[in-house]
Amino acid sequence: MADQQQQGGVSMEKIVSLCRRRGFVFPSSEIYGGFAATYDFGPLGFLLKKNIEKVWRAWNVESRDDMVEIEGAIFMHPKVWEASGHVGGFSDLLVEDLVTHKRYRADHLIEDAKILENAGALKVEEVDTIIKEHNLKSPDGNPLSPAKRFNLLVKTHLGPVEDEASVVYLKGESCQNIYVDWKPVLETTHRKLPFGIAQIGKAFRNEITVKNFIFRTREFEQMDVQYFCKPDEADQWYEYWKKNRQDFYTQAMGFSPDDIKWRQHDPDERAFYAKDAWDVQYKFGEIGFQEVEGVHHRGNYDLTQHQKFSGTDLSYFDEASGERFLPYIIECSGGFNRLFLASMFEFYREDGDRKILGFPPKLAPYKAAVFPLLRNKEDLVKKAREVYEGLHKKFMVAWDDRGNIGKRYYSQDEIGTPYCITIDFDTLEKGDVTVRDRDTAAQERVKIEDLEAFIAKKLE
Ligand code: ATP
């Protein structure tokens, strides 16, 4: 986005419209009028999702020898959520418009009214005082109710009887699988500290206000790295992971450093057990810098709680010192939806009426598109199908024979395809094709037998 010309950055509307038009993201149950800020990834969104996950996994897991990855269940023992503090304390402050009865997050209204920059840690009485002193009204201009706490856990029942004993919660944060599986991971992998457990997993929150497309939804995925270390090494690992996250966004994802900002939590904003907490923020075009990931110094709170509530010893035995202790955890918890949306903002640009998603080839849904110069010339189409089918075995490749070549280029630019391959009359004679580069619009002739290596090289 660094080269973005528009004032104030790309508008959310453009991204939402592109996502729907080209099949990146659809409103869920759209034929029923959509449903409560839930979304589906369409064919291109699914491919982008898999590519983002691949980049995340390569950086966080596969290129390291101190990381393992798990995939935990969505349903967990209900006590997990008591131990984690979510049943008692995972709540937002809610206020109600006294006329429309619409509910709002108090901190968001206070922040939107520019009364405070960060209102997330306010207590009920503080919110009530601010509402009174500033005569704060709802977005519809109506008076507001006093604030009350609203628990965000999504509750359901499992089993044949719907009573208190059958209450279960959908995961309020995905990382709880990791804390609970710390013991079996340790037992089965025989790892020594320090090491991490990574996971990409679903989370569910009954968010009061859902807004900004897929930025805040009630069902989303989190991408976690929970790093277990010796207590006296935790500060040093915390610094390491902060730097690592900056590098992940700028090097692995290819985001401009100008679009990444760090925000430290105020002491009264972070959990009482946390030693330090920072948010990584991304500049989402016109809506500005917003959190994409939390990097938290959690001490041994999570393991202490699960040890207490489960009655299972979760300590680690350090052979070198002969000591037994609960490791400290450094948490890097990012939101997949936000990383996906950030990728759309980061690589979107316009050149006249051309819309371009300038994805690096590793992120691009299709690595190349293959066209016959003319769709009604049988020998051109036959040759183009041969090229397409050959490449399709190795990479995600698009086929397009609609409209003229110019239109096809525009269409592929808009979905981020880095290379367009055209089969023309010269191809039939010389066995080479025109490869047009999305970013430079430069064209070069490449031999058909060299195409696979050409694309593979760009993916390195
Ligand atoms: P926020 O302040 O935006 O509500 P949070 O601080 O509660 O987020 P965490 O609990 O730290 O978020 O979760 C880690 C990450 O999960 C966040 O950085 C964000 O990327 C993602 N996330 C959290 N809530 C949502 C949501 N409702 N929709 C999409 N992603 C979310």
Image (cartoon, rainbow, N blue to C red):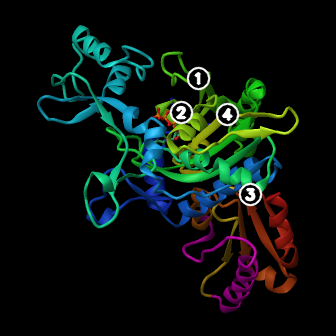
Q: Which mark is residue 330?
A: 4
Residue 338 locus on image (x, y percent): 53, 43
The amino acid type, in three-letter code, at marker 4 is Ile
Whether residue 440 appears in this view of the structure is no
Cα–Cα span, label 2 and label 1: 9 Å
Three-letter amino acid code at the position of disc 3 = Thr
- Label 4 close to label 2 by CB (< 8 Å): no
Disc on the earlier residue, 4 or 2: 2
Q: Nearer the viewer, residue 424 or 35?
A: 35
- Ranked by sequence position, the earlier of labels 2 and 1 is 1
Q: Residues within 10 Å of mark 3 (few under 14, many from 20)?
A: few
- Secondary element type, mark 1: strand
Relative image position of residue 444 (x, y in whole percent): 82, 64
Name the residue type under label 1.
Arg
Sequence order check, earlier mark of 2 and 3: 3
Q: CA distance from mark 4 to mark 2?
A: 18 Å
Q: Which residue is mark 1?
A: 263
Question: In the rendered structure, which disc, 4 or 1, sits on the residue that comes first in sequence?
Answer: 1
Marks 2 & 1, CB-CB < 8 Å contact? yes
Query: What residue is shown with label 3?
Result: 188
Q: Is residue 187 left or right of residue 25?
A: right
Q: Is mark 1 within 8 Å of ligand 1?
A: no
Tag nearer the camera, 2 or 3 = 3
Q: Which residue is mark 2?
A: 291
Q: How many marks?
A: 4
Find the distance from the CA under tag 4 to the CA under tag 3. 22 Å
Q: Residues within 10 Å of mark 4 (few under 14, many from 20)?
A: many
Position of residue 453 in the picture relative to residue 253 (left or right)? right
